[in-house]
Image (spheres, rainbow, N blue to C red):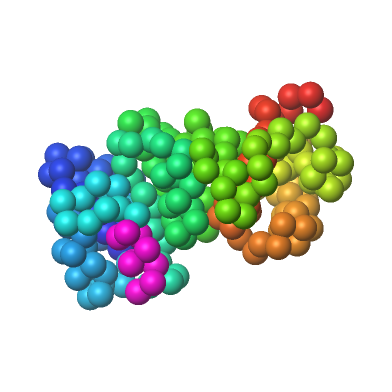
């Protein structure tokens, strides 16, 4: 497995590299202190994941994300930053990021984030759960916020609504199955009609849809 770290702060980069090697001893970790240096490595190495800092000396992280996804559409890129802004998270998802990891997360949360994105799941900071960005009422978004209080309001069945709440909080299928005391396959079965109703095929796209439409959920399990 090959991971690329693009971060201009040496201490942060080295710390993450050491942690990655502890978690995955056989992992090859590449490091770059600028976006252009990272892009050069991406063109030479087959990568499984890129951790991209938001603030780089030669490039805005979001611009870098767009360039990486254009050059390597199937590459898993996760934003890795000390900045936690809902608008930035929203833009990163729209540009194709598989997640947004804040540098202040705990070791356990960091490990879980890596496992999620490497298995094809989307990772979001806990504080982003179910919250739209400030621009959620712009362009294609519905005006204002839409608190989702019932399945009928979204055209979903009660179980689909319940599962969507957990998805909005960044939970994996396995975690949702445990919370609802159902089989993981049952969660996947309910996800298919949810994807169809929102016209998406991936979790990232679904989360972007929720953000765009300003759909806000309460805590999973509350009021059910």
Residue 3 lies, with reference to residue 129, above or below; the image says below
Q: Could you tell me residue 155's position as x and y percent?
A: 84, 48
Give the residue at x 73% y 49%. 187
Prevailing SS of the magenta stretch: helix
Q: Is residue 16 visible?
A: yes
**204 on left or right of 183:** left
Location of residue 176 in the rendering, given as x and y in whole percent from the top left corner: 67, 40
* 212, 99: nearer the viewer: 212
The magenta stretch spans residue 67: yes
Residue 115 in percent (x, y) is at 46, 49
Position of 126 with respect to 156 (left or right) is: left
The span picked out in magenta is: 63-71
Task: Assign the C terminus to one quadrant of the image.
Answer: top right
User: Could you tell whether 35 is left or right of 191 in the image?
Assistant: left
Q: Position of residue 113 (x, y in %)?
A: 44, 44
Displayed quadrant of residue 161: top right
Q: Inspect this view and state whether residue 169 appears.
A: no
Please report the residue visible at 72 percent of the width from the left and 57 percent of the height from the top.
198
Instruction: Kindly identify the residue that appears in the image at 82 percent across and 35 percent down.
Output: 150
């Amino acid at each position: 497995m090959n991971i690329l770290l693009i971060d201009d702060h040496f201490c942060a980069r080295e710390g993450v590299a050491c942690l990655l090697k502890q978690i995955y001893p056989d992992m090859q970790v590449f490091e770059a202190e600028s976006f252009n240096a990272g892009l050069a490595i991406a063109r030479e190495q087959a990568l499984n994941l890129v951790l991209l800092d938001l603030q780089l000396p030669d490039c805005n992280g979001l611009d870098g994300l767009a360039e990486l996804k254009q050059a390597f559409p199937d590459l898993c890129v996760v934003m890795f930053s000390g900045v936690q802004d809902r608008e930035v998270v929203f833009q990163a998802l729209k540009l194709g990021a598989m997640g947004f990891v804040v540098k202040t997360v705990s070791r356990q949360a960091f490990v879980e984030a890596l496992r999620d994105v490497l298995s094809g799941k989307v990772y979001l900071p806990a504080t982003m759960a179910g919250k739209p960005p400030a621009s959620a009422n712009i362009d294609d978004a519905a005006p204002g916020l839409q608190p989702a209080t019932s399945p009928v309001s979204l055209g979903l069945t009660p179980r689909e609504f319940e599962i969507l709440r957990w998805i909005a909080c960044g939970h994996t299928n396995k975690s949702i199955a445990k919370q609802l005391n159902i089989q993981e396959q049952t969660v996947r079965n309910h996800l298919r009609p949810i994807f169809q109703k929102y016209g998406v095929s991936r979790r990232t796209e679904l989360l972007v849809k929720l953000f765009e439409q300003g759909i806000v959920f309460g805590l999973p399990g509350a009021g059910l």
